[in-house]
Amino acid sequence: MNKNKATQISLQDITITDRFWIGRMELMAREVIPYQWDALNDNIPGAEPSHAMENFRIAAGESTGEFHGMVFQDSDVAKWIEAASYSLVNFPNPDLERTIDEVVDLMGKAQQSDGYLNTYFTVAKPDQRWKDFSGGHELYCAGHLMEAAVAYYQATGKSIFLTIMCRYADYIDSIIGPAENKMKVYCGHEEIEIALIKLYRVTDNERYLKLSQYFINERGKQPCFLAEEPTFNSSKTKWFGLDYHQAQVPVREQTKAEGHSVRAMYLYAGMTDLAIETGDETLYQVLQKLWDNVTHYRMYITGGLGSQGHGERFTLDYDLPNDSAYAETCATIGLIFWAERMLLLHPESRYADVMEKALYNGALSGISLDGRKYFYVNPLEVIPEAVKDRYDLQHVKLERQQWLGCACCPPNIARLITSLGQYIYSQDGDVLYTHLYIASEAGFHVKGGQVRLAQKGNYPWDGQITFTVQTPKETEFTIAVRIPGWCREYQLKLNGITLEEIPVVHGYAKIRRKWGNGDEINLQLAMPVELIQAHPKVREDIGKVAIQRGPVVYCLEEIDNGKDLWSIALTTKEKLTAEFAEDLFDGVTIISGEALKADDSSWRDSLYHPLRDQTKPFNIKAVPYCFWGNRQPGEMLVWIHRKG
């Protein structure tokens, strides 16, 4: 396997101190994880029922009744355990750990004698095992359970859950694979590809790596077995064909992101993991093409993915409608997973730029500030009356929901935030890469010994970032400082002296020297208010601009700007100013300034009349997109008309 590979920093080696993030991480531990546990146990009055934990109790023989929920309901519990496990690293909690132990014990009892573990096919359809790969989600659920087992083992050192899931993985490997006596199949919803490689990394059992490799290499081979399944044929339409499952051609022949956006992201993340472990250069070339297609043609400015609700899928290049955008929270989170892996495969700042964009915009919008409500869908324009009356907007919600019938997103955002420390840095030999500007302290082992790097700042509201080296002796290594793609001007200083000729390689300023204790890097990123325009082929956004400052995309809300937001027009960015509001959203930079608004006072009952300029001065207030809908329901708009 590939021994010369970059690595992420373990959660045990990093402490986040960032003002923006530490409160959110504490919220996960204090509010979100207990709240989601209550939701999984149907203890949230007025919320969509889950029944997920009750399904496990029934499967374990500790309760009676019928299975309820989605066929993949087990994965909600798995992602909750994963999030809770990461939280234990940050905030040890014996009661929470005891609860997880009890769930693991329940799973052990629900596991069948051959190693199989799935409540739907154990309780509801025991005679239908392994007969519905396009929609049954058996391998998908297995993957999430494996990821949870790895996370819990790494957080606590307890191996019982890992043993349960290794037994399940061994069983899967015994019935699926290239051997003549095995099924030649893969899951319609990718996930297990990621999980098996995580399992391989903690067990060093190459059997799991090879099974992941098989799933990836087998996908898309023709004739495709999925097309022969009754469940596939019953839903076979233009939007639910083989490309919905990324199975239209073998993965190494794919050049465009097609189909269900979450499935695609999980596939690409798994492919990247495989390339990292095997050093497969051809796979990396494919991943670059797919990355370019996603980020150059099919991604919203917020990092959202998926232009169409029907099929929760990609459509075509430059097709990025705003009011009917799907942009599922899980898809944006999947993009973050993929970006982080691409950084390990080949550290280029373009991957970190997208990871940051998705994190601060399209992912965070999926959860309310109190952690108790969630968006599944993240449009870039909301008109309440249209949402209520238009069939094509039925997937859009005006407010975040207490819980969801399909609740994949709530525990997904929880596991992302609780594991955030893994995304800030990576290490490749004696090169330490800084990918995200999140105040923290991290430990690294380089050839000269142990060093620590302390990062301070008030990002994303301020572009002043400081890194301080902590080392017991002079040690030579490289610190690679990311220069964000959104930044037009920056300044780097070392111990107060401006660095003029530092090489910038793939977007990282690489500073190599013998570092002493207390050496300090100061990075100043200029953060002016910018008006961003979309490519002219994005027909929804022609003649419009979006407000951005640093990595943060802004929006207009009705609560600040009144109704008819679509009638507002911006003229120039020079008329917009940034100001930090301490009392709004726990502290946030807002954008305000002069604009124009259509004056309809003389229109009376006319629907059309000859062109004339009918505008009036108007002052706007824009807030970060990720915080919209936290005060009261109403209109929201990202792309604003431009005049002049």
Image (spheres, rainbow, N blue to C red):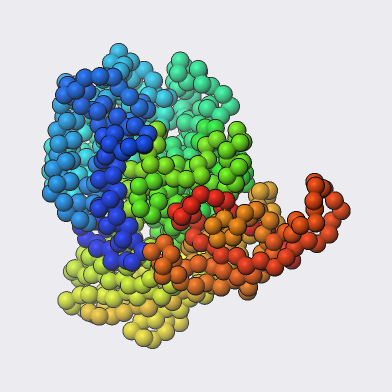
Q: Quadrant of the C terminus?
A: bottom right
Residue 405 placement (x, y as % from top left):
40, 33
> With 136 as the anchor, is 382 left or right in this view?
right
**Position of residue 342 measured from the top left corner of the image (x, y, whole percent):** 40, 52
The x, y position of residue 6, in whole percent, is 32, 56
- Give 413 or 352, whichever is nearer the viewer: 413
Quarter of the image that includes the N terminus: top left
Residue under the point 36% across and 17% down: 131
Quarter of the figure with residue 146: top left
Give me the residue at 35% from left, 75% from top.
466
Query: Could you say which is closer to the camera, residue 600 or residue 622?
Result: 600
Q: Is residue 187 visible?
A: yes
Q: Compared to 161, does 2 lie above or below?
A: below
Q: Residue at x 65, y 53 (%)?
A: 564
Q: Nearer the viewer, residue 353 or 505?
A: 353
- Residue 272: x percent and y percent? 39, 46
